[in-house]
Amino acid sequence: MDHHFVGIPEVTGVPRVAVVIDVMRAFTVAAWAFSRGVERIVLASTESEALALKESHSGWLALKDGAPAAGFDAVNSPGLLRSCDVAGRTLVQKTTAGTVGALAVASAPLVLCASFVVAGPTARFLQTKDSGPVTFVVTGEGGQADEDLACAEYIGQCMAGGDVEAAPYLHRARTSRAAADLAGGLRSGYHPDDVDLCLEIDRFSFAMMARQEESLTVLRPVAVPDIPSSLR
Ligand SMILES: O=C(O)[C@H](CS(=O)(=O)O)OP(=O)(O)O
Ligand SMILES: [Mg+2]
């Protein structure tokens, strides 16, 4: 299938189906948040918008990438988020790449946000929708981030059907610049398990869909049944 792979600066117009990829770390963090019971994630375009949304809605939490900061309840780290008590809460997320990419295509009729931890469910969801060609928004490094490209290509292959070996794609991500930066302590708000947690294939059984709800862009999990091995 003739999928498109674009960086955020190349997003023009409104794609019919967009899959926004951020492996390290926004959409690995989002998936962990849902697995911890977060009800929905509101994607904010700036840190000040994230704080304003939190302040104006009782019980909402705010998360941003980089170092911990006043007013924010969490950072963009799966290793740190996995022990946070967030069940039943609404989380406002603002990061450098992932949330920016999702907001760039927010008006598309179908928008999924993805990383390796939800790659298989994302591909199966698109298959059930008979989605046709997908625009993959490769959020890191202006569309060149190999961890995001590898994940996008893996999802594209899975959509085509058959058994797809994840190992080569995960290897590309493990040897990416982002993985080296994270492991080397160059990114703030970091847990030593972050790289490994970002490279767990299909850890979760849901896809993540972004929709417009009133004036907000809201990400929610969508359960996707596994395919019985007898039917694969
Ligand atoms: O927190 C992250 O890993 C990055 C921050 S940066 O791009 O390295 O400054 O944000 P993300 O949007 O999750 O790629
Ligand atoms: Mg990233």
Image (cartoon, rainbow, N blue to C red):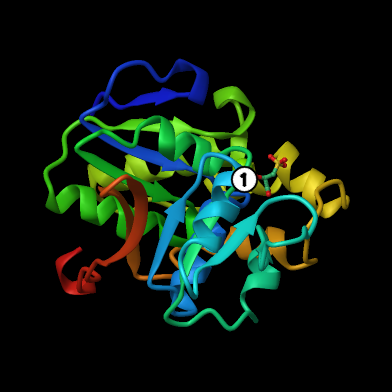
Tell me residue 34's x, y (percent): 44, 71
Left or right side of 86 for 129: left
How many numbered discs, if any? 1
Question: Which quarter of the rendering shows the C terminus?
Answer: bottom left
Tell me residue 230's x, y (percent): 17, 73
Question: Which quarter of the rendering shows the N terminus?
Answer: top left
Q: Which residue bears the numbered disc 1?
A: 48
Left or right side of 20 for 190: right
Occupied quadrant, residue 195: bottom right
Occupied quadrant, residue 110: top left
Question: Looking at numbered disc 1 in the image, what kind of residue is underneath it?
Answer: Ser
Who's the residue at 48% across and 44% down the image? 151
Tell me residue 150's x, y (percent): 52, 39
- Residue 60 shows in the view: yes
Left or right side of 207 for 49: right
Who's the residue at 65% across and 81% down the image? 83
Tell me residue 157's x, y (percent): 34, 41
Occupied quadrant, residue 141: top right
The answer to whether residue 134 is above or below residue 46 is: above
- Residue 7 shows in the view: no
The answer to whether residue 198 is above or below residue 101 is: below
Q: Residues within 10 Å of mark 1 (few under 14, many from 20)?
A: few
The answer to whether residue 74 is above or below residue 83 is: above
Who's the residue at 29% across and 51% down the image? 123
**Residue farthest to the front, as pictured:** 56
Question: Which residue is at the front of the view, 165 or 148?
Answer: 148
Question: Which residue is at the front of the view, 158 or 107?
Answer: 107
For mark 1, give the secondary structure: helix
The answer to whether residue 169 is above or below residue 13 is: below
The answer to whether the beta carbon of the residue marked 1 is less than 8 Å from any atom of ligand 1 is: no
Quadrant hosting ligand 1: top right
